Image (spheres, coloured by chain):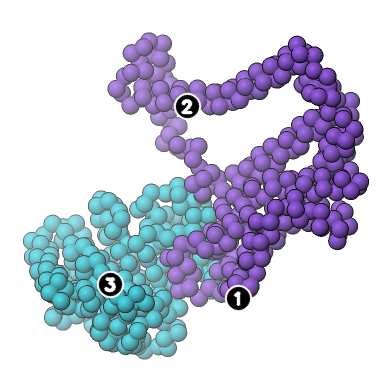
Amino acid sequence: MSAAPAYHSETLVALRGVDKAFPNGTLALSGLDLDVRSGEFVSLLGPSGCGKSTALKIIAGLSEPSAGRVEWRRTPAAENKSRIGFVFQEPTLMPWASVFDNVALPLKLNRTGTAESRSRVVEALHRVGLEEFGRAFPRELSGGMRMRVSIARALVTEPALLLMDEPFAALDEITRFKLNNDLLDLWQALRTTIVFVTHSVFESVYLSSRVVVMAARPGRAFSELAIDAPYPRNNDFRTSAGYAALCRRVSEALAQAMAAGEAR
Amino acid sequence: MTTSRPSTAHSRESGNPASGTSQGAGSPLPRGRAEAQLRRANRDRLLRVALPVLVLALGIAIWEAVVRIKNIPPYVLPGPGLILQTLFADWSLLWQSLLVTLATTCEGFLLAAAGGVGLAVLFNQSRLLEYSLYPYAVILQVTPIVAIAPLLLIYLPQPLAVLACAWIVAFFPVLANTTLGLHSVDRNLADLFALYGASRGQMLWNLKLPSALPYILGGLRIAGGLSLIGAVVAEIAAGSAGAGSGLAYRIAESGYRLNIPRMFAALLLLSVAGIAIFYLLSAVNYFALRRWHESALAAER
């Protein structure tokens, strides 16, 4: 809709006419087209059942599309795939391992040397403000801290693309606002690309440079809105009239998408 | 931890004067309630130890009294006093036998642990192997060991037959539990491992086995008791063939000789061994899981 900043222009990964049918016959996605541009923060917003999580798993390569293609640009797909970070709705930590070992997991799996792994884990923990908690176990932490560990683990490989599947949905509002701000800071500092799945209009507007509204039954991209408010955004933005107006526009788009989903 | 300590110290300070009066217990303040809860928990713990001990003492007293009053001869029913005397008098004999039985039990248990976990891992890696062999594992489990033992004694040398019995009874719970554990991996964690390109070995070693650990330990706890039972059953079956020197053999032998006090003494030792095995494995379970698994943390609340 509006001109995106220059570093947004290049497509990092694109879904082209992607269908996903599950063995039980459910059509989770039908003809989904989605461009993820380098450096942008794009949210997939939609009602439950619109296939937004499925789309994320397809981008990650955790799920194969039934039809259509996933196209990676610029560099070989294999190289890009090794640089994906994924954050689930649950923190999804190994309960038997310390915070340090949890964050070190991706490096351990790709056999990074101990010394390098160590310094990168320390850095990732520092980025999410948990440098003091390396030796703690997940169950000793609060929900918000566990989610920070999960984010640190996703960042430890310095991913080109960070996929987040409703990561803050289970948290209380105060913790969620705090993590929203921290996530924006991280995004700005790391210049990574984020695809963020959410069912919250307010969260999607606050965070994203672009919101893709999805409709359900079958899941598809319904409309797309650029959120052209400048970064860095903070609590002033959250209480501004501009934010409220953007939320209203996105809400209306979502309402239309839901009506379209029901009409079918 | 750090937050709970000051709050309990606080409740002790303010709760002590109130605890003497009846108002303190019913006070609506959370502090008073916490205090009452703590006291109830303490009393509960005391009762859990005291009541079984009391029942035991009562039972022994009644037993001794009945034996004395009715003048029951020891070859029909010996009194607890006589059993204890026999235990001390025959200690060297019984101790040697206990060691034999415990050795068999331990070997059977270790083989069952290795076999159960090993087979479960193999089944987990190869579906074809699982389909081919699992039914036979079930058949081994459901056929009563008492019926298999005499056959094994015909085909195997006696110590090996006893060991085989201990193994057959004990390995199945380990196999079944480990299989369950290996299948109950968090799906998202499995996705995460796949995303980072984990090899099969990494998946097994870093994800599946740790996830299955609580289940494996649960299986081992059952297997410990069962391997003792397997060893005893085989020894008794072997005993009738006139060989062996384990504790169960002593029981069978004492039975034939109408040395009932020694039968009871050997039985007592077997029970104590069973209890010791159970608590030993519970302790292992606790120390392996205490930092992360719910089952080991329940007491904290």
| Letter of the chain that mark 2 sits on in the rendering | B
At horizontal 76% and vertical 37% (from top left) the residue drawn is B270
- Residue A77 visible in this rendered orientation of the protein: yes
Q: Are marks 2 and 1 on the same chain?
A: yes
State the residue position of label 1: B128
| Letter of the chain that mark 3 sits on in the rendering | A
In the rendered view, would you say A92 is above or below A175?
Answer: below
- Residue B10 visible in this rendered orientation of the protein: no
At horizontal 91% and vertical 46% (from top left) the residue drawn is B242
In the displayed structure image, the side of residue A131 where residue B112 appears, left or right: right
State the residue position of label 3: A52
Q: Earlier in the sequence, mark 2 or mark 1?
A: 2
Alpha-carbon span between mark 3 and mark 1: 36 Å
Label 1 packing within 10 angstroms: few (<14), some (14-19), many (20+): few
Label 3 residue SS: helix
Which residue type carries mark 3? Lys
Palette colour of chain B: purple
Alpha-carbon span between mark 2 and mark 1: 52 Å
State the residue position of label 2: B41
Work out whether residue A189 or residue B241 is closer to the camera in this orientation and state it.
B241
Q: Which chain is cyan?
A: A
Which residue type carries mark 2? Ala
In the displayed structure image, the side of residue A42 where residue A61 appears, left or right: right
